[in-house]
Image (cartoon, helix red, strand yellow):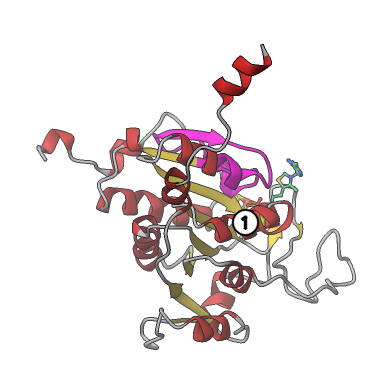
Amino acid sequence: MSDSNKITLASFNTNYQPTWCPGCGDFGIWTALKMALVDLQIPTHQLAIVYGIGCGGNMASTIKCYGFHSLHGRTLPVALGIKLANKNLTVIAITGDGDQYSEGTNHLIHLARYNANLTLIVCNNQLFSLTTGQTSPTSDQGIISKTTPKGEVKQPLNPLALSLISGATFVARGAAFEIQQLKELIKKAIMHQGFAHLDVLQQCVTFNKINTVDWYKEKIYSLEQAKHPTSDFKMAIEKSQEHAKLPLGIFYQTQKPTYEKEITNVPIVFDFKKALAEFI
Ligand SMILES: Cc1ncc(C[n+]2csc(CCOP(=O)(O)OP(=O)(O)O)c2C)c(N)n1
Ligand code: SF4
Ligand SMILES: [Mg+2]
């Protein structure tokens, strides 16, 4: 590749800058993602990113590529449609915890089951932040927020366990403040042939005064350093249940045929042209 074709961080620049609060974890995710795209040398015309509605989704228009700022909860079906229309594109969906694990939960389950070759990155700040800090499905019990003035009573959803039991072939967790590790996880998720779910612990410095970077740093540890076997499904389930400590890295990775490959192997059972001719 000649130097003029080389993809650099500047290749992804647009005329827009993010408007997140200073110190927001979304800056770390945005940076790690662009660094991963550079390392993988993915050209802007071969990349489509679909964004959810939330603070993380406001990354839309700050990365040069095909972009689609979709509906709250509906990022994955849009991403799947793009992938089916053009299998050669690298397709990434970026959503928030409120978006993906609330209105979008059904799509998460079915995309994991389909195993379409997509990457899902969830900016998980354990709150609905764009709407000024209500509890989300991943908020811890006891959290006081505008919607839970006496503390959250509901048990949090476990998104990684949900993906695992739904059939996802790549399940991982990163952190917005561990940028080098996050970059490597994003690269592995993109290179994975199948549905890759990457949950990212993300500080919201404005509304989440409990799950701060210091709070997370007390709890995180590396699965790689702990020599976690990523092909062991039962161990992955066990690791996904840990709450006192928070493992970072790949929980599980396996290979299955992708959805888009499988459906091209299936003969067309409904011949629209023939049906139309008969109808006329
Ligand atoms: C269909 C629909 N439902 C609800 C909303 C309102 N809404 C916009 S952003 C948001 C919260 C987003 O939370 P999350 O996905 O966690 O992203 P964050 O802002 O925390 O990054 C909600 C409920 C909407 N815009 N559209
Ligand atoms: S409200 Fe929270 S998540 Fe949203 S931009 Fe500010 S710090 Fe980031
Ligand atoms: Mg959120």
Q: Secondary structure at mark 1?
A: helix
Residue found at the very far right of the displayed protein: 150
> In the image, is residue 75 part of the stretch drawn in magenta?
yes
For disc 1, does the CB lie below 8 Å from ligand 1?
no
Q: Residues within 10 Å of mark 1 (few under 14, many from 20)?
A: some
Residue 163 at x, y percent in the picture: 59, 67
Name the residue rendered at 37%, 81% in the picture.
224
Name the residue rendered at 60%, 43% in the picture.
77
Frontmost residue, 268 versus 236: 268
> Does 219 appear above or below 59?
below
Residue 215 at x, y percent in the picture: 59, 77
Q: Quadrant of the C terminus?
A: top right
Which residue range is magenta in the image? 50-79
> Does 50 appear above or below 236?
above
The reply to whether residue 125 is in sight is yes
Residue found at the very far left of the displayed protein: 2
Residue found at the very far top of the displayed protein: 280
Residue 57 at x, y percent in the picture: 58, 44
The reply to whether residue 206 is in sight is no
239 left or right of 63 in image: right
> Does 105 appear above or below 155?
above
> In the image, is residue 203 part of the stretch drawn in magenta?
no
Write down the residue under mark 1: 110
141 left or right of 64 in image: right
Name the residue rendered at 34%, 37% in the picture.
46
Q: Count numbered badges in the picture.
A: 1
Frontmost residue, 80 versus 28: 80
Name the residue rendered at 47%, 41% in the picture.
267
Frontmost residue, 174 versus 19: 174
Frontmost residue, 61 versus 232: 232
Residue 120 at x, y percent in the picture: 51, 55
Quadrant of residue 201 within the rendered picture: bottom right
